[in-house]
Amino acid sequence: MDKNKICEELYALPEKKVVKRHKKLIMPLIVLAVGAALLVVNYRLDGANYMNIKASLSFIGGVMTIAGLAIVLWRLFSHDGIPYYAPAKAYLRYEELYFERAKLREVMQLTDAVDVESLLKMESQTVPVVAVMIYHTEDNSFAACQAFEYVDLEYRPLCDLRIAAR
């Protein structure tokens, strides 16, 4: 099972329906701003009565500032991205589901039909005997899935990547 191969197949779809895109920077920028604000409040507090509060503010503010800055820099300068479905203007969610071997036929039928809603409703388990990798929009207007079987210490594809856009 290789997420990168599936992503490459999605990016190769005609008309560039799925593209690689970075997530928005708004949340890391908010974390950075709140962390910096806590450090400023820490700096403004005077007196021995606030020593515990100052220690907490400096620790929490420092961690938030460093984390926010690291995420902003990573998103700005990394070449990583996640699949984005342009017609629906939505990022694709990734799901990895595991099923027992007895459900192989049902899983294959649902995978061939690209019935993501039914696959997500099925009872899954933690032992990955039969696995299904799914990329889908939140409203399932676009979905791509592929089934795999765990044999001889590796995952072997049971079918090609199935794609459905509604």
Image (cartoon, rainbow, N blue to C red):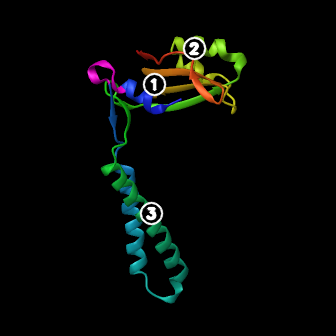
Towards the viewer: 152 or 51: 152
Outermost residue, front direction?
152
- Determine the secondary structure under disc 3: helix
Magenta stretch, residue numbers: 11-17
Q: Earlier in the sequence, mark 1 or mark 3?
A: 3
Q: Which residue is mark 3?
A: 64
Q: Earlier in the sequence, mark 2 or mark 3?
A: 3
Residue drawn at x 51%, y 82% as measured from the top left: 50
Q: Position of residue 115 (x, y in %)?
A: 53, 16
Determine the CA span between mark 1 and mark 3.
33 Å
Q: Which residue is mark 2?
A: 110
Q: Above or below — where is 9 with respect to 52?
A: above
Quadrant position of the N terminus in the picture: top right
Nearer to us of marks 2 and 3 is 2
| Residue count near mark 1 (Cα–Cα under 10 Å), binned few <14, some 14–19, many ≥20 | few
| Residue count near mark 3 (Cα–Cα under 10 Å), binned few <14, some 14–19, many ≥20 | many
Q: Is residue 126 left or right of residue 69?
A: right
Q: Which residue is mark 1?
A: 139
**Residue 16 magenta:** yes
